[in-house]
Amino acid sequence: MRLPPVEVDAETAPLPMLEPELRAVEICPICRAKMRRTSELCPQCGAERQYGPTRIESLICTGLGMVAVPSLILTLVKPSPWLALFVVIGGLLGFFVANVRFGGDRWIRKRHA
């Protein structure tokens, strides 16, 4: 049994299958799986997009600044009440360094517990 031919006009013609735009697809830098450019998590490996420093990176850099700047000052001059101010300045400088050093967006591997 043959079906009768169907007339196709502009209104009833099937639309071609849409291919994703190359700009909308990104490759995970960890596992090389395809994913959306706006994804925050890789669906394949679970890597997470991180903006700016993590909490531990901020704490380490701030702590190093709070130790390094006063240590440098103590090697140059004798201890004084100004040392507390230099501890604060060192902490702020360390926090600034953390934000500059880890400021861009990057992908961090998922830690397995």
Image (cartoon, helix red, strand yellow):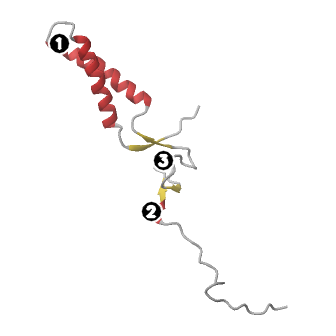
SS for callout 1: helix
- Indicate the position of residue 32 as horizontal and vertical percent values: 50, 53
**Amino acid type shown at disc 2:** Arg
Q: Nearer the viewer, residue 101 or 111?
A: 101
Please say if 78 is above or below 29. above
Mark drawn on residue 34: none
Measure the C-alpha gap from mark 1 to mark 3: 44 Å
Identify the residue under disc 3: 30
Which quadrant is home to the C terminus? top right
Within-10-Å neighbours for mark 1: few <14, some 14–19, many 20+: few
Measure the C-alpha gap from mark 2 to mark 1: 55 Å
Measure the C-alpha gap from mark 2 to mark 3: 19 Å
Which residue corresponds to the image point at 38% horizontal and 28% vertical from the top-left?
A: 58
Q: Tell me which corner region of the image, top left, top right, bottom left or bottom right, holds residue 4.
A: bottom right
Which residue corresponds to the image point at 24% horizontal and 19% vertical from the top-left?
A: 69
**Amino acid type shown at disc 1:** Thr
Identify the residue under disc 1: 75
SS for callout 2: helix
Please say if 39 is above or below 90. below
Which residue corresponds to the image point at 26% horizontal and 12% vertical from the top-left?
A: 84
The reply to whether callout 1 and callout 3 are in contact (CB within 8 Å) is: no
Identify the residue under disc 2: 23
Please say if 15 is above or below 52. below
Q: Indicate which label's residue lies in the foreground, 2 or 3.
A: 2
Residue lying at the far left in this picture: please name it.
Answer: 76
The reply to whether callout 2 and callout 1 are in contact (CB within 8 Å) is: no
- Indicate the position of residue 66 as horizontal and vertical percent values: 30, 19
Q: Left of 23 or right of it: where is 86?
A: left
- Indicate the position of residue 39 as horizontal and vertical percent values: 51, 50
